[in-house]
Amino acid sequence: MAEFKNVRIGDILLERGIINSDQLTECLQIQQTDDRKIGEILVDKGFVTDEEISQVLAEIYEIPYVNLTEIKIPNTVYEILPIEILRKYKVLPLELDNQILKIATNNPLDVTAMQEIQYLSGFQIDPVIACAKDLNIHLESFIETMHTLQGSGKNPDVVGASEIPIIKLVDSIISKAIKERASDIHFEPQPKQMRVRFRIDGILYERNPIAHNLQRKVISRMKILAGMDVADNRRPQDGRFTPLQYTNFDVRCSTLPDVHGENMVLRLLDKTQITFTFENLGMDEQETQMIQQLIRQPHGMILLTGPTGAGKSTTLYTMLSALNDISRNIITVEDPVEYRLEGITQTAINTRAGYSFATAIRHILRHDPDIIMVGEIRDQETAEIAIRSALTGHLVLSTLHTNTAAGAVMRLIEMGVEPFLVRSSVIGVLAQRLVRRLCPHCKKDVLISPEEIQTISKYVPVDTTTTLAVAGKCAKCFNTGYMGRVAIYESLIVTNKIRQAILNDPNEEQITQIAVDRGMKTLKMAGFKKAVDKVTSLEEVLRVTFTEDI
């Protein structure tokens, strides 16, 4: 929506010779004891017409002037805005084309009105100027027609518009997702309807679908909220917004063109419920002490590995929070910045502007950092710059996409980083996964089976008297059997023996075995320990760690 500069309409009319200075002075004196606008007083005194004022405004603001007597309003716009909004802001819907609503107004400077109309309609707004007298006449005629069209049972005064239910529908879906602790909402167009799914504790659950004839309106509504281009449905777009009813949430939006329409995913981020502590991560006392000792090193590189959605960012933020004090300069480069941390400088990459992870690190090094957090190492250039930073007196925290802790070491070498640089820079690697916590209200104890003993006993001690827990169903967990998630970790400390192995062309299994011999718990060990402690189920551990074996 255009931004307008304030103008003194009286001065403009004077400059154009439409009024003289005596007339303007007289009206300004009246305005000192009158709440009306100067234009209204000039019209009331007969010094100028409504049309003249509106045409001047249209020329100044480069907004089209319309003669409403020449406009034929289609029936499709009669149900877009409620009557109370039309009367409150004195606006007249004229046309809906390609998700853009054209409205006539006599006050294009009323930004609040334009924003509320855009919000309520779900469409982008294209204002045009009409004279006040004609606008009032045509507005009342428009409202009478709205009442006439109620024959089908619609009530514009109550429902407001056919688009108002779309707004309520989108709001209700977001509200339901937040109440069910969903991290993501998927809107997926299908041939006959739009599928809606919530990701809760890492698993997608289907919810009520959206009728096929509403899917474009629903997507358009969310694109408006996120500041996206409503008319562009051929390219992926990203945006974000804060729901009016849940201001403590950030909603990140992403669209993807689909053969059946536009696919949209919303990521829900709660800004207030996050407290970054090792206890909240689910670490035991031994793991916490080891990680705290690792991050207190003055320099070196610490890597976190795992698939997307494994909680790596949360662990990184927890480490940064533990390190954050007045004596350290901490700078992060992220894609994007997910959570704001007070006292830490956070920057987001912008690939379109040529601001990549590697470019950002180069600039960060000029800002005297003690600790650098790199959201992700994606290529050789970023890896080498991050490693050089670690070798020149900085503590560098970052992430890689590998399945195991030892795999991170091998991935750096595969990227083209020299083994001697990896050996000298990397001081520790954490592989992690998130397993669902069993709902404490409905979980059930069961005696371990012989097959389960055979599966678990290689990793943690169990016997025939051991009991495990399985998921139940109840209203508190929305019948999923689980409530929340907890991380399991595989913590690899780079010892002298591992450093030596890195130089000898090792494989992932060799490095893992050396670490296990020195006391490292693998992901399966950590997961089965959570199962024996009845924090999660054996089924959940096997689901999450099925590729991790030593």
Image (cartoon, grey):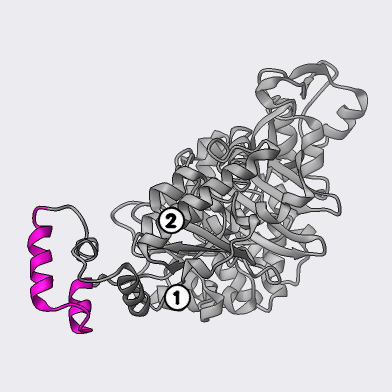
Q: Which residue is mark 1?
A: 64
Image side of residue 544 versus residue 379, left or right: right
Q: Which residue is mark 2?
A: 137
Image side of residue 21 versus residue 499, left or right: left
**Amino acid type, callout 2:** Ile
Q: In front: 241, or 297?
A: 241
Q: From this view, report whether residue 41 is shown above or below residue 249.
A: below
**Amino acid type, callout 1:** Pro
Magenta run includes residue 164: no
Q: In front: 536, or 342?
A: 342
Q: Position of residue 132 (x, y in %)?
A: 36, 61
- Mark closest to the chain's N terminus, 2 or 1: 1
Q: Position of residue 60 (x, y in %)?
A: 33, 78
Q: Secondary structure at mark 1?
A: loop
How far apart marks 2 and 1 lie (CA) works out to: 20 Å
Q: In front: 135, or 166?
A: 135
Q: From this view, report whether residue 146 is shown above or below residue 128.
A: above
Find residue 250 and name its label: none
* Residue 202 visible, this angle: no
Q: In front: 246, or 11?
A: 11
The residue positioned 67% from the left and 44% from the top of the image is 519
Question: What span is in magenta?
Answer: 9-33
